[in-house]
Image (cartoon, rainbow, N blue to C red):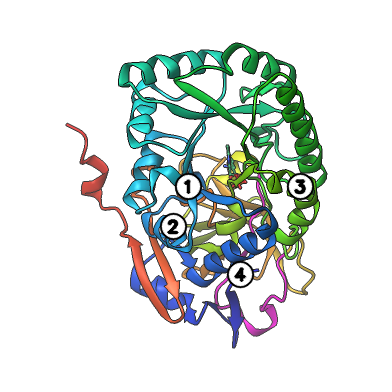
């Protein structure tokens, strides 16, 4: 669900018409709904309440400080994958004790930063990383709580680029190796291996991969117990879906219905659960506004050339991802009642929605059935809150767009649009 709806034919975020945002802030611009973020977070917490998990919001999905602060105030911890993300979490007022630090390529400086901050949990991806961690912890004379990232070899049935739970990825170690890992390092006094970490992929639209991964991991936990190693934390990672089309994704309650029964008695015996959701909280809570600059015909094709492109939202060109795109103020017959790849309305025409970047791979949609467009039309790219702004770049020296957080009919600019001076600020 989200709070981007057409009222009297005009698209509004909560109670604020998006045309007003575009007039005041300009385009391109990311707009987030505060109530949607809050509701998604609460639904997740409610659904998984029987497990009383620590919900660590995955900063990589949308790292704006105001959004991290909002979620921190609701009680979330943070899932970070770099020193920069840890810096963000702390700057947003989230205590390091509620942060988990994952990632295959942590530098010595990042490990040191995390240990000094007294991070809640360091998720370890390889033997070499463990040894490095031990060395750094010893130098700092600190102990660290670590979780081993296990690769359960399940297929999340998602895009190849975001499939992480299969054996042939750079992430984690397989189950057999995990056993040996604990035999080798399980008694290390400096780095306490207290947990296991999973993250099988993103987005995962069915529950079975989670069920399979959790079952395999519980069997591993039992094996480790027989070997004398107690696992007290299980971090299930992220990956829950979002609605790029209407009602595409399972709800938090559906994921919980499959996962909770597998873990409830373990939790009763003291196992602590962590979740790392990103997309499911913020994807539908954010949209991208872009203005049509020109409509151009080339051969049989019609292009709507917009002021947002692959630099603003990379997902379509990088993953061939579908984002529903529609005018904010369409003519009356074109007010949509759903969001889908193929909209069955008379009068739609196939249009390529493209950006200003000097590459033919710069597109937001290809051959998309849309109402006829004209210069000046304001378009909304939906479900852009996750991996939108966080993957935006300054390619072609395009300044990064503004970000706005809406609550009711009020808006806050939570990141100002970059200027040309910003573009060159670090250069000489
Ligand atoms: N935890 C770990 C260890 C992760 O690697 C990720 C995402 C998450 C949690 C959060 O996953 P989520 O709940 O957001 O699905 N750029 C891609 C998605 C990459 C996901 C990377 N890892 C996209 O635009 O679809």
Q: Which residues are magenta?
A: 320-339
* Residue under label 2: 72
The answer to the question of whether label 4 and label 2 lie on touching residues, with beta carbons closer than 8 A, is: no
* Total labels drawn: 4
Q: Is residue 322 magenta?
A: yes
Indicate the secondary structure of the residue bearing disc 4.
Answer: loop
In the image, is 112 to the left or to the right of 349?
Answer: left
Q: Which mark is residue 78?
A: 1
Q: CA distance from mark 1 to mark 3?
A: 26 Å
From the image, tell me which residue sits under label 4.
Answer: 2
Q: Give the quarter of the figure containing the N terminus.
A: bottom right
Name the front one of labels 3 and 4. Answer: 3
Q: Report the residue marked by disc 3.
A: 265
10 Å crowding of disc 4: few (<14), some (14-19), many (20+): many
Q: Residues within 10 Å of mark 3 (few under 14, many from 20)?
A: few
| CB contact under 8 Å: marks 1 and 3 | no
């Amino acid at each position: 669900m989200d709070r981007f709806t057409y009222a009297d034919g005009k698209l509004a975020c909560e109670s604020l018409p998006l045309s007003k945002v575009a007039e005041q802030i300009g385009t391109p611009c990311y707009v987030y709904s505060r109530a949607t973020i809050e509701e998604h977070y609460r639904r997740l917490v409610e659904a998984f309440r029987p497990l009383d998990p620590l919900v660590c919001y995955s900063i990589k999905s949308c790292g704006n400080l105001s959004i991290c602060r909002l979620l921190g105030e609701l009680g979330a911890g943070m899932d970070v994958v770099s020193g920069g993300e840890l810096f963000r979490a702390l700057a947003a007022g989230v205590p390091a004790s509620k942060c988990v630090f994952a990632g295959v390529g942590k530098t010595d400086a990042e490990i040191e930063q995390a240990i000094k901050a007294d991070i809640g949990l360091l998720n370890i991806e390889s033997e070499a990383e463990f040894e490095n961690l031990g060395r750094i912890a010893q130098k700092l004379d600190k102990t660290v709580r670590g979780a081993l990232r296990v690769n359960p070899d399940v297929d999340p049935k998602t895009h190849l680029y975001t499939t992480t739970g299969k054996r042939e990825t750079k992430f984690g170690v397989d189950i057999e190796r995990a056993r040996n890992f604990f035999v080798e390092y399980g008694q290390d006094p400096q780095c306490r291996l207290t947990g296991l970490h999973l993250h099988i992929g993103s987005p995962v639209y069915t529950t079975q991969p989670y069920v399979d991964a959790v079952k395999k991991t519980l069997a591993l936990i039992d094996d480790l117990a027989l070997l004398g190693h107690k696992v007290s934390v299980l971090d299930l990672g992220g990956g829950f879906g979002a609605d790029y089309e209407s009602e595409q994704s399972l709800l938090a309650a559906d994921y919980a219905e499959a996962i909770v029964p597998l873990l409830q008695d373990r939790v009763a015996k003291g196992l602590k659960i962590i979740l790392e959701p990103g997309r499911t909280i913020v994807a539908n809570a954010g949209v991208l506004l872009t203005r049509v600059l020109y409509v151009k015909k080339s051969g049989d094709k019609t292009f709507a050339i917009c002021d947002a492109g692959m630099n603003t939202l990379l997902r379509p060109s990088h993953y061939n991802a579908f984002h529903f795109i529609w005018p904010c103020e369409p003519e009356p017959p074109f007010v949509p009642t759903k969001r889908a790849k193929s909209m069955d309305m008379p009068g739609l025409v196939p249009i390529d929605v493209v950006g200003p970047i000097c590459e033919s791979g710069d597109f937001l949609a290809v051959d998309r059935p849309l109402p006829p467009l004209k210069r000046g039309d304001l378009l909304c790219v939906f479900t852009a809150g996750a991996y939108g702004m966080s993957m935006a770049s300054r390619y072609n020296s395009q300044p990064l767009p503004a970000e706005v957080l809406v609550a009711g009919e009020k808006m806050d600019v939570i990141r100002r649009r970059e200027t040309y001076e910003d573009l060159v600020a670090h250069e000489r």
